Structures are given as structure tokens and as C-alpha cells.
DNA sequence: AAGATGATGGTTAGCGGTAACTTTCGAGCA
DNA sequence: TGCTCGAAAGTTACCGCTAACCATCATCTT
């Protein structure tokens, strides 16, 4: 079978070089204490000399485990996910797992495709952003028998492990903070409008309704959020609702963009207009004034995910649970 | 062999259900036109009914190709990489390839580990950020026989495909633009100081030296860059070199942070201090004033990478080349 | 001294696919 | 009618590695 792309070095090549069988080499790599020290050293020397790269596809196929976990994130440019990723990665690395990343672009169809791909590679676990998936994806996940984490939002019906925070409650709490500061005409500015953005908006709406206030000043777009967009949309809002006193932006990027727009218009923040964002990214503390926001415990979410996942990988039984890590409203100087 | 984690559905199960052999099912999936239409439809029905997930590990093992490409990026929160990623992903997807992502955290050791992992999974190609790798990683790559892309920077000795821009020339061009605007005391502010940041700084230095000016006002740190850090470091610089007229920040984040610091200090930009960043991210157009920067053709880099990679994947011979996609200095309003 | 024991390494039989070759069979043609 | 030919499906062998079981041998026991 004339395949072998090139002279790829296999376990057998190492075994031949040392004069043992390949299972011994395999053991030397996976359970070193089961191979005598002198032999082990000769094997290690041969591996270094010949430049052996283990074929994980073959290993995963034979053993059914791959020592890797896939993380599917909606956006690479959104710093929210990088904090979570770091937590997960560091937790898993200590236990010898590799983290592989997939990019869904906020599409559950693309998510489904990646779930299929990574399950097909035999990953031992999967971390998904969000709790909404295609029907087919859910079927795949159930059938796969590997631990699955859904994160960021909470759901009453977790597939398996669910770690996040109540986005609606956070949106509501932030809005109530606006109200507590005396603002009455509080608008909502949202982009992308993925599920989490919708939940935050629902919180905004609920808080205003509960206070008997209007939820009219609401501007959203399916476009991805950006600083530029935050500025443009704020402009539209001010034109349409000139009496606006405050704007809840569904994330920090939009809020920063809105703040820059205010600076251009010489609109004092918060005296002429109050602003708030969501997530507590680095930028909110850097701007002048610092932006009000909801700080989400992203790093802790990542840490906890790693802990829960490792427990399952090490044999703990599946027991669907939802874990709420909370949030913190930070007033900053823009409110 | 009591393994089979669960009742995972295999090609054989589909074949049994339909009453054919598994190779026919395999063909129905990969080369549909080679299987008669009625049979194909029965196979497709069985696949849907039983919920078959192809095992890519097995396929990759048997065929030597995985129809996937790995992209290793230093940072998830840096928007630079998301543009490149999008270009690559869209280009590859059209040809039926999946893009898998690994996170190196700017560490070439971690990069080495990921190269090993992904090669072990049998990816058909690899895209690396940067041109510096561990010796062992380079050996792995050479031996693997798969196309490799090095991106962002240029190198006279590409491993294979190299697509990027001359970071030093860009740093120099931006600095010369400062000089053309009449600034003489031009400082450099750098964080992380990865290889690309060093190259940009070398460009800054070269431009100043060529003009017979001092390169003394230079502040760098190994810490990861952030808006906050940009502000803090600008503060230190102003304290240390009060006569500073302009600052070249090694990326847009730092520049934005520096701008915010100026706003806090009521230092007019550019009248009291000129600023510039690097990359041309969204934020530079959003701030007031817009920031000067070097716009890097990130999306185009991604697109070209996909094209070059696909050519190699479809059989074009390896022929190490370095492709310079250039850059554009944008003056904005901060200079 | 004979069997039990533990450490070390080997044998066998796949994991779930795919490449390459072979077989079968009906259509087209002289 | 006999033969070639191409489409459709099957056979065989193997990708590189590992689980489970087995063999060997020096060291202990009693």
C-alpha cells in the first residue's frame, strides 16, 4: 500500500531500532514505570534520534481517548472568550489535556459542524458557548457520551455541565442601578443580538416595566458590534430620542464607541448622558471617564469549567447541573 | 475487546442496515456519483436514522488526509488574528477544509506542543503566526511533509509559504511620517515585545538614527498590552521625558490607552502630544481624534494564505517563497 | 526444592475507516 | 452471437496504535 506520505517515523521504527516490540515503546511513553529504566532510556534516545511524532489519530482510534478537549467560541476578537479560554486551558493542561479551539462565528450551524468534526477526532470533552444548539447537534452530543459544558448563560435544562451567570438578571440589575441614580429615560443599544444580548435586553425591559417606564428607546442591529458601530448607533438614538438620559449598551465595545461619539459631540458623560456597557473588559477602566458595566467572572468561569470537566473525565458520573457564578455591577464614572 | 464507549454508530452498522458492505457506504459519503442513486438514497436514509458520526481519526489514519488545517495564534483577544482567521477559514471552507485553532500565548514552546498535537491528528496543513519557532518544531514541520504557512512577518528563509508584511519597514515608515510632520522627539512605547513588536521598534530606531535624532525615549515591558497599560506607560514616559513631542505605540491598544490618558491629563492630541498605533484596528477610527496607525492587510493576508495553501493541498509542489503584502500609513487625526 | 509472586516484555486482535484491485453484469457494437 | 467496456459493488489488506491476555524469569516463601 504505497501511501505513507513520507518516511514518517512510527512506533515500529523505534522498536526495530531498539530491538523490542512496539507495545513496549508504547508503554515507555504512556506508563514509563512499567518499563525497566535502562530499556526506557534506550527507547527515549531512539525517539529523539529518529524524531518520532506520535500519531494521535491512531492512538485515539485504538484507545477511545484523545486527551484533548474542544472549546467552541463564537468570536475570536471578543476578549470575553479569551479569559474563559485561559482558565480552561490552564486547568486542563495541568492534567495533561490539550485544548483545541473552534470558531463558530455565532452560528449554531457552524457549531454543529464543529461538534461533528471534533467528536469525529475523538475529543474527550466539549465546551460550548451558549445553551442553544441545533437539534442535530444535541443529538450528536447525547450520543457521543462525552462530557459537555455549556457556558456563559444559564439554562434550566442543561445537557450536562452548565456554568455561567444569569444574563437577564445582570441586565436587570444594571438597569436598576441606572434608575437608582435617578435616570428615567434609559435606552438600550444592542448589536449582533445573539442570545445573550437578547437576554440582557430582556433584563433591561423588565426593570423598566417594573418601574412603569417606557421601553421605547431601543435600537438594535444584527451587525457585529464594534467601536465604530457604537458611535454610529448612539448618533441615531440621539437623533431619534433627543431627550434620552442614559443608554445601556449591550457590551463594552459599543459603550466605548458611544463614549467616543459623546466626546466628539462635546456631550458630557455622565452629566448630559449616562452610559454603561457589559462585561467589564479592560477598556472600561481605561476610558475617561471609566465606564459603568457589569463585571462578569470570566476567568472564574473558565477555572470552574476545568474543574468540573476534569472530574467527569476522571470518572465522575454525569449529573446535569447549572452553576451560577454571579456578576457585579460596577458604576465607574459614566453614570 | 470491551471498549466502544457507547453504542457509537459505525459505517458497518449502516452497511448492515442497508444490506451492503461498508466500503459502499464510505463511497456514498465521499464519492456519491460512484454509487447508484437508489442505493445512495437508502444509505442516506439509514445514516440519518441511526445518527452516524464519521470517525475522522479512523479516516485520517486510513487515508493519510484529514481535510483540516490548523491555525496557531498567539492571542485570542487580539483582533489582529481574527481577521486573518476569517480570511483563511472562508477560503478553506469553500474547498471542504475545516480550520482548527490552537492558542500559543506567544510562547514558541506552546507552539511546539500544538504543532506536535495537530500533526499527530493528521492535519493537512499548518498556519503559524510568526517566523520564529523552536528547533524541534522546525524539525517536526520539515519531517511532516505538510504545507506550512508562516505569517505576519517576513523571513528570508521561509520554511515553506510565507505571507506577511515587513514590520520593520512599517515601523520605519510610520516614524518617518512623524518626522515629516515636524516632530523631533519621538518616543517608542512597547508592550509584550514579541518578535513583531521588536521589529517595529527596530524600524523606529532606524528612522530616528537616519535623521540623526535620539532614540532615548523608549519604554517597553514584557507585560501583555492593554488599554490600561498604555495609559500607565504613557504616564511614566511623560514623567521621565517631559519634552516628548510624539509617541509611537507598538499597537493600537496601547495607543488608545495613551490617548485616554492624555484626555485625563487634558493634554491635547495632537497639539500637545502626537500619538500613533499599529495595525489599523476598529478602535483607531472610533476615538476622538482618530488615531494615526499603520493599516496592515490582515484580511488579505488570510485570503492569500487560503489560496496558497489550497494550491499546495491540491498538489502544487513545495517552493519556499516569501510574499510581501505591504501596509499603509494612515495619519488619522492624532499626528 | 517446588510452587507462588511480581516485574518485565511479547502476542493477538482489533479500533473504524480507505486504497487498490477484482468481480459482476448489463449495454453497445460489429 | 460473441466480445469489449464501463458502471457498480465487493475483497483484501492495512493505516499506527493500544487493550487484554499470556509468557518468561529471577526472587521469595515455606
Image (cartoon, coloured by chain):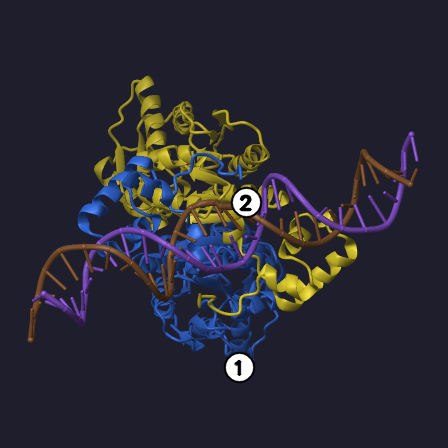
Chain colours: A yellow, B blue, C brown, D purple
Quote the CA–CA distance across marks 2 and 1: 62 Å
- Disc 2 to disc 1: CB gap under 8 Å: no
Quadrant for residue A67, please give it.
top right
Residue beneath label 2, please? A63
Mark 2 belongs to which subunit? A
Res A42 seen here: yes
In this rendering, position of residue A113 left or right of residue A239: right
Residue beneath label 1, please? B210
> Is the residue B127 above or below the residue B229 in the image?
below
On the same chain: label 2 and label 1? no
Give the camera-side residue of B11 and A29: B11
Q: Residue at x 32, y 57 (%)?
A: B96
Number of numbered callouts drawn: 2
Give the camera-side residue of C9 and A219: C9
Mark 1 belongs to which subunit? B
Quadrant (top left/top right/bottom left/bottom right) for the C terminus of chain B: bottom left
Q: Residue at x 41, y 29 (%)?
A: A167
Quadrant for residue D27, please give it.
top right
Q: Position of residue B323 (x, y in %)?
A: 40, 75
> Is the residue D19 above or below the residue C19 in the image?
above
Q: Position of residue A160 (x, y in %)?
A: 46, 29
> Is the residue B307 above or below the residue D23 in the image?
below
In this rendering, position of residue B232 left or right of residue A244: right
Q: Residue at x 71, y 50 (%)?
A: A32
**Residue count near mark 1 (Cα–Cα under 10 Å), binned few <14, some 14–19, many ≥20:** few
Callout in the foreground (2, 1): 2
Name the element at disc 2: helix
Amino acid at each position: 500500500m504505497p501511501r505513507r506520505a513520507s518516511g514518517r517515523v512510527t512506533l515500529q521504527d523505534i522498536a526495530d531500532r531498539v530491538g523490542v516490540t512496539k507495545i513496549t515503546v508504547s508503554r515507555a511513553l504512556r506508563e514509563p514505570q512499567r518499563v525497566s529504566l535502562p530499556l526506557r532510556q534506550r527507547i527515549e534516545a531512539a525517539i529523539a534520534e529518529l524524531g518520532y511524532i506520535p500519531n494521535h489519530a491512531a492512538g485515539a482510534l485504538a484507545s477511545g481517548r484523545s486527551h484533548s478537549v474542544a472549546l467552541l467560541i463564537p468570536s475570536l476578537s471578543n476578549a470575553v472568550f479569551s479569559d474563559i479560554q485561559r482558565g480552561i486551558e490552564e486547568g486542563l493542561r495541568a492534567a495533561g489535556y490539550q485544548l483545541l479551539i473552534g470558531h463558530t462565528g455565532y452560528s449554531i450551524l457552524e457549531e454543529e459542524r464543529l461538534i461533528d468534526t471534533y467528536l469525529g477526532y475523538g475529543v474527550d470533552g466539549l465546551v460550548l458557548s451558549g445553551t442553544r444548539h441545533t437539534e442535530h447537534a444535541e443529538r450528536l452530543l447525547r450520543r457521543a457520551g462525552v462530557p459537555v459544558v455549556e457556558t456563559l448563560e444559564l439554562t434550566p435544562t442543561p445537557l450536562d455541565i452548565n456554568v455561567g451567570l444569569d444574563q437577564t438578571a445582570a441586565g436587570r440589575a444594571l438597569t436598576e442601578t441606572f434608575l437608582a441614580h435617578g435616570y428615567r429615560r434609559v435606552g438600550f443599544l444592542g448589536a449582533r443580538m445573539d442570545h445573550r444580548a437578547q437576554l440582557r435586553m430582556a433584563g433591561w425591559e423588565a426593570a423598566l416595566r417594573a418601574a412603569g417606564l417606557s421601553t421605547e428607546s431601543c435600537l438594535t442591529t444584527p451587525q457585529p458590534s464594534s467601536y465604530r458601530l457604537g458611535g454610529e448607533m448612539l448618533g441615531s438614538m440621539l437623533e431619534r430620542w433627543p431627550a434620552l438620559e442614559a443608554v445601556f449598551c449591550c457590551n463594552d465595545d459599543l459603550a466605548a464607541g458611544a463614549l467616543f461619539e459623546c466626546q466628539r459631540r462635546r456631550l458630557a458623560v455622565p452629566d448630559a448622558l449616562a452610559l454603561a456597557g457589559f462585561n467589564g473588559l479592560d477598556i472600561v477602566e481605561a476610558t475617561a471617564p471609566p465606564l459603568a458595566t457589569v463585571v462578569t467572572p470570566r476567568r472564574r468561569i473558565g477555572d470552574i469549567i476545568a474543574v468540573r470537566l476534569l472530574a467527569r473525565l476522571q470518572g465522575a458520573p454525569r449529573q446535569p447541573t447549572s452553576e451560577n457564578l454571579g456578576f457585579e455591577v460596577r458604576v465607574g464614572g459614566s453614570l
